[in-house]
Amino acid sequence: MRASIFSRLMMGYVLLVVLSASASVYAVVQLGKIRDVTHSILLVDTAIVDIHKSLTDVLLSETRYDKKFVIMNDQALHAEFLGANREFEGLLNQAFDRVDSPEVKAVLKEIADLHDDYRALFEEEAGMLAAGQPYSAGWYGETKDRFVNAMLEDLARVRTLSQGGIVTKVTKLNEAGASATTAAMIITAVSLAVGIVISLLITRSITVPLTRMERKTAEIGRGIYKADLDLTSPPEIGALARAFNFMSAKLKEVDTMKSDFYSLMSHELRTPLTSIKEGTNLFLEGHGGPVTEKQKRLLTIIAEESNRLIGLVSSLLDLSRLEAGMLPYQFVRADLGALITKALGEVIPLAEAKQIRIRKDVEPSLTARVDAERILQVLRNLLGNALKFTPKGGSVRIAARHVQRSGLNAGTGTPDAEPPAAAPDHGEKLVEISVEDTGPGIPKDHQAAIFDKFRQVTLAGAAKVPGTGLGLAIVQHIVNDHGGAVWVKSEEGLGSTFTFVLPA
């Protein structure tokens, strides 16, 4: 089962939070180690160095009181010696309590033993002096000096070891700081990379199906109702895709029903309309008896309206067959110049009636593989529209030439615009045919819809021109079925240019 958008976002956020929390925990642990090392330096090693100085001073004081007492045999000096002795032992106990190095503790223990021996020898000598007994003062003095010198050496070792411990711990402190910095940078980089990857994956899982749905919407807008939208996406978008497929199926069903209705009605209407037309012509020709002038006018109106209805029915039938893909094509290599000349010959009477000047600019030897009758129908529709919308005294120009895609002289409403993406890009030459008029032009916001069925554009203040709105829809179908494209370039008040291209 695929995770929803909410679940994907939450999983991404949780993963990022876990990575951030891991980085924070690691940083806290490293900071704790740094704090412990710093406290050890401040409270142990530095304190031991300070105590070493005090122990040295007190030991030297003991030695001075010892020597003075031996010379002067003064009990006050004896008491001073004992006070210094107790102070030395107190400092030594403080050092024992603070030190954390087994090696330093061993040296301090050795100092304590030497100090005990030194005091015992002092007390032994003091007892002999108090009793007035003869003794070897030189031996006692030398022995006590050896004890003192040994203690001073040991105290120097304590200082050296403590200072070495400080250096070692500072080195570890630097290493811990560097390690913490490196780890923090790595974790930050990994978090950033993971965050970017997660964001890209989540975004892609949403945008890719939405892009496909956007393309599907464009297809539906063009009348392609295939229910083939299959998305690998979160459940929410998958449900929307299923709704799109359901909508496409329903639209296709409605479009099929509409096309069938048009086709059926066209078939059913054509026969009675033809009968009405032929019967009207018979009455006009006098086969039904004498006809008055008033009856002729009425019969002429009936005949004209019958022709108009037959044309509408024929257009509906053609459009239905084109949309259903049932209109057969007979592709042959045809002379497009000849087709243009034939189409112009059919519309000359209308142009003369409206005093419209027609200009033709066609390259010689212009051929293409086409269905000649259907391309002739395209030309008739485009020329008919141009003459219909061009005012009296205007002009219409039809041009045809070979072009490459980069040289297409058309657009979508702006003077120098390129043709739509639907224009073919076959690599070989194309044939471009354009019909330009001097009519009122088409507003830009209507240009995209003029090829829709039953769509006619009427400018504000202008009279509505009669028509079915099917001609351009038929033109687009026929041109597209030939592998070409058709578009319009127009500006209000400056006329319109309808252009289509075909593979040469």
Image: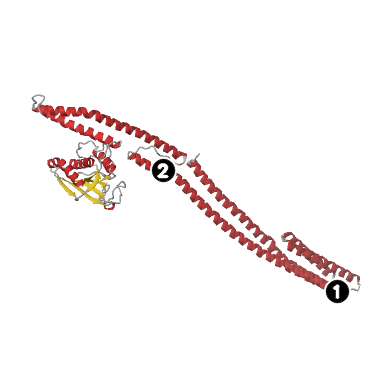
Q: Secondary structure at mark 1?
A: helix
Q: Mark 1 = which residue?
A: 139
Q: Position of residue 307 (x, y in %)?
A: 18, 32
Image-quadrant location for residue 299:
top left
Residue 225 position (above or below residue 189): above
| Amino acid, disc 2 | Leu
Q: Secondary structure at mark 2?
A: helix
Q: How many other residues sit within 10 Å of disc 1, few (<14), some (14-19) or many (≥20)?
A: few
In the depicted view, which residue is nearer to us: 226 or 442?
Answer: 226
Image-quadrant location for residue 470:
top left
| Amino acid, disc 1 | Trp
- Going by the image, does 325 lie left or right of 361? right
Residues under labels 2 and 1: Cα distance? 104 Å
Residue 483 position (above or below residue 30): above
Residue 18 position (above or below residue 153): above
Whether residue 495 can be seen here: no
Q: Position of residue 165 (x, y in %)?
A: 68, 64
Q: Which label number is shown at residue 446?
A: none
- Going by the image, does 56 lie left or right of 135? left
Q: Mark 2 = which residue?
A: 210
Q: Residue at x 72, y 65 (%)?
A: 51
Image-quadrant location for residue 217:
top left
Q: Of the two numbered discs 2 and 1 on the same chain, state the one appearing first in sequence.
A: 1
